[in-house]
Each structure stands twice: as structure tokens, then as C-alpha cells.
Image (cartoon, rainbow, N blue to C red):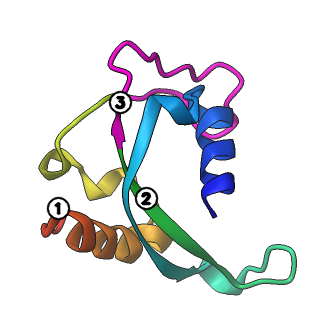
Amino acid sequence: MLDALHREVEEELGLKPKDYRVVSSKGPYRYLFLHGRKKDGYDGQEQHYFLAELTTPEAVIRLEGSDEFRAARWLPPASFDLDWIGPMKREVYVSVFRDFFGIEPT
């Protein structure tokens, strides 16, 4: 699982494994696609989440080439707005924030 995390973080954010350390991980978290939709024969996804700490403060997040992100910024967990997430994933995000930070996003 850590190999997949390192690959995705480098591919989507441009950060190398030396730039961060995994503090904890939790999962699986599951959600269903909306309206009975299927993708590759599945009706939802199962995901694991990781809490990581930046260990190289001068590391720069690079989004060029990312298919999934247009912008990034650092913010405290309590500032996260649940409206930023599509409806099918909101319940998962509430669980993730509760499990990692002991709060529920609004």
C-alpha cells in the first residue's frame, strides 16, 4: 500500500517519498457511485487514507501534468469545507476527518 501512496503522491503532487513521512493510515473507507453507476464492473470504491507530515519544508507541490488537481493549498483541518467534495464521497470524508482529527467538517 505504501508503494501505491508514494507513486500517487509523486505523480499527482510531485513530492518524493523523502519529502514526507506517513504518520498514520486508516481504512478501508467505502462509498458507492451515484445512480447505480458502475466503473470497471464495480459499484463503488474502497480507499485507505494516510496522514503525512512534510519533512522537507522547501518541497514544492507541482500540479502540472496532474489529471486530478488544479490547485493546492495548506489549511488546518477545521477549515475544510465539505461542499468541496462531491455528494457520493461526503460520508467518507466525515469519517476520515473524525478518525484522523477528531472533528467533523462542515
**Magenta segment: does it hold 28?**
no
* Above or below for 30 versus 75: below
Q: Is residue 88 above or below residue 67?
A: below
Earlier in the chain: of badge 1 and badge 2, it is 2
Q: Tell me which amino acid carries mark 3.
A: Thr
Residue at 19% across, 62% down: 105
Nearer the observer, disc 1 or disc 2?
A: 2
Look at mark 2 in the image and give the residue it sits on. 50
Image quadrant in which the C terminus is located: bottom left
Kindly identify which residue carries mark 1. Answer: 106
Q: Which residues are magenta?
A: 53-72
What secondary structure is the stretch in magenta mostly built from? loop
Which residue is pictured at 25% across the width and 66% down the height?
Answer: 100
Q: Which residue is disc 3 drawn over?
A: 55
Counting residues from the start of the chain, the first of labels 1 and 3 encountered is 3
* Disc 3 to disc 2, C-alpha distance: 15 Å
Q: Position of residue 73 (x, y in %)?
A: 33, 28
- At mark 2, the secondary structure is strand
Foreground tag (1 vs 3): 3
Q: Quadrant of the N terminus?
A: bottom right
Name the amino acid type tagged 1. Answer: Thr
Which residue appears at 28% of the width and 71% of the height?
A: 94
**The disc labelled 2 sits on which kind of residue?**
Phe
> Dot 1, how many residues are within 10 Å of its Cα: few (below 14), some (14-19), or many (20+)?
few
Q: Earlier in the sequence, mark 3 or mark 2?
A: 2
- Front of the two marks 3 and 2: 3
